[in-house]
Amino acid sequence: MKKIVALCAAAVLCLSLLSACASKQEKQVDLAAFAQTLQDDHEFSGFVERVDLTDEEFGAVMLENSYPGLKDMDLAQVEVYLSMVSFNTGEFALVQAKSAEDAAKVKEIFEGRITSMTEEGMNYPDTVEQWTKSAKVADNGSYVMLVCHPDVDAIVDEFNALF
């Protein structure tokens, strides 16, 4: 009888450990909702618009020009808002990758975007300055964000608070 009780207690402990591990799974975040919150809470230029990823002509071209390689990745969620004028007035991109490797690749693509805008900047000094001072990449597990906005630090804090 003592052996049965001990086995049952051991089984309960094992199940407790498994459920504790399961509760540490990554929290799911709705990036479309967060994108809307960003627009509601922070003033983005009227030239910043959501890129329609289903638009094979314009959307896919805009995405490839701004974030080379991103459109070819199999991602869980993608929300990209770009400036639709040649002088870039800020933007943000939110991605949920399906693996740690893909999240690292997205982060690399986003960092490449910042480098591109600070080194080239379309020859607009204000654009280069904005991207130099106000652009960051933040990541949390499989979620990665790029933002270029005067409120960059507050936006990064809001992103991190989602998790």
Image (spheres, rainbow, N blue to C red):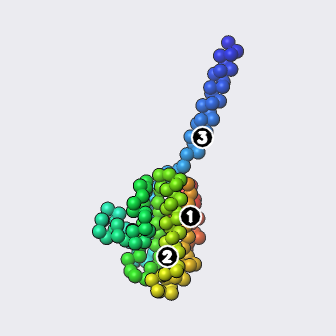
Pick the front one: 149 or 67: 67
Who comes first in sequence, dot 1 or dot 3?
3
Report the front residue among 57 and 88: 57
Residue that mark 3 sits on: 21
In space, the residues marked 3 and 2 are separated at their CA atoms by 41 Å
Q: Position of residue 77 (x, y in %)?
A: 43, 57
Judge depth for marks 1 and 2 and give the one in front. 2
Label 3: element kind? helix
Q: Quadrant of the N terminus?
A: top right
Circle 1 Cα neighbour tier, 10 Å, few/some/many (<14 / 14–19 / ≥20): some
Q: Is residue 29 left or right of residue 86?
A: right
Residue 73 x, y percent position in the rendering: 42, 58
Label 3 vs 2, first from the N-terminus = 3
* Residue 160 rendering spot, x and y as whole percentages: 57, 60
Q: Earlier in the sequence, mark 1 or mark 2?
A: 2
Which residue lies under the disc numbered 1? Answer: 138
Element under disc 1: strand
